[in-house]
Image (spheres, rainbow, N blue to C red):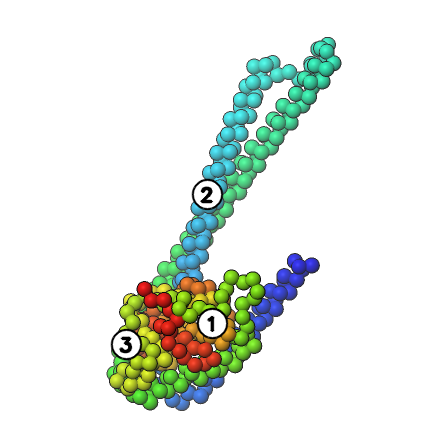
Amino acid sequence: MALAALPAQAATQEEKLKALRGRIDKLQQDLEKKEGSQREARDALRDSERAISQANRALAQTEAESRRLRAESAKIAERRKALERTAAEREAAIGRMLIARQAAGAPDTLRVALSGDDPAALARSLYYLGYVSRAGAELLRSYREAISEATRLASEIDQRAARLRSLEQTQRSERERVAKERRERRKVLDKVAVDIRKNRKDIKQLQADENRLARLVQEIGRVVYGRVERTPEAGSKREPFASLQGKLSLPVRGELTGRFGAPRGAAGIESKGVFIRTAQGQPVKAVAHGQVVYADWMRGFGNLVIVDHGQAYLSIYANNDSLLKQVGENVTVGEALATTGASGGNEETGLYFELRHSGRAFDPLRWVKLK
């Protein structure tokens, strides 16, 4: 009964996931429509930065598959070696058995029966011969099975090796694609750099960025309203997010150059999060278990990912070079969501990070354990 219910549960989960993605996509389209006529210099970077993110995500997926295949191949190779050792041992045992039989004149059942020996001794001899015959047959059968399984594993290793060669070729193509997209972004950035710097000093532009993110968070809250208030199931090892204050780790290691409430740039807008300066390409890790509810490029924040942690808590990671997760994917604490960069026209490489509850931003540093 329980096994029969599994496909239905999987189908229901897939339907929910599809519905969530559809609603988030519609939300993104609605937000873009409202700003369609208000183009900015930073928007010129959108296509190239999205392309870089997608290419890097594809590259990360193929690299992860390559690592998995190599690990599987190593385990299969170890198993094959063990089977070959077992087969060699059984082959040697069969050889010893045949030599022993030949040396003893290879007594058979008929000769023992006609020997005229005591009936009790005859029964024992017949039983012994039967036992030896069965043991020999079992030894031969297990030897053949070991050889057959070792041959099958050798074929499996060959298949994985072919798949690895294909993946390596795909990786080379994807690396070339990433390099090409970076060159395109560099050209675009060179053209609009002056305008971007000018906009980032404009208080109206920064206020518009902040309002845009606040509106997105508010709409996301409505989209997932029926789910965000849910607490972890009884018996689950996951702690409710509200109980994690003082236990979180920052998503990335680096230098804190912007704090919550501090003025942002020359415009003086108060920051709703923190900025952690670090090198490009560092893994951005989820601060807690949750589900990705937004993963796309957004004006003012570049490649942006938002994770829902339940109980109306969201974590926000912006300024990324690449997004490694998509809407609907569940993530665990410490799992890589993105890689650091300077997208959206931002000049510093690093991560902009926010925590929000019911749409209101609060100081992340009050929730993390700083070393």
**Can you identify the residue that label 3 sits on?**
347
Determine whether the residue tagged by mark 2 lies in a helix, strand or loop. helix
Residue 242: which numbered mark, if any?
A: 1
Q: Quadrant of residue 368?
A: bottom left
Q: Residues within 10 Å of mark 1 (few under 14, many from 20)?
A: some
Q: Which mark is residue 77?
A: 2
Q: Amino acid at mark 3?
A: Glu
Horizontal and vertical percent position of residue 360: 43, 81
Secondary structure at numbered mark 3: loop
- In the rendered image, the quadrant that contains the N terminus is bottom right
Q: Position of residue 150 (x, y in %)?
A: 51, 39
The residue under label 2 is which amino acid type? Ala
Image-based side of 230 in relation to 163, left or right: right
Q: Specify the amino acid type for callout 1.
A: Ala
Q: Quadrant of residue 230?
A: bottom right
CA neighbours of label 2 inside 10 A, class few (<14), some (14 to 19), many (20+): some
Q: Looking at the rendering, which quadrant does residue 176 occupy?
A: bottom left
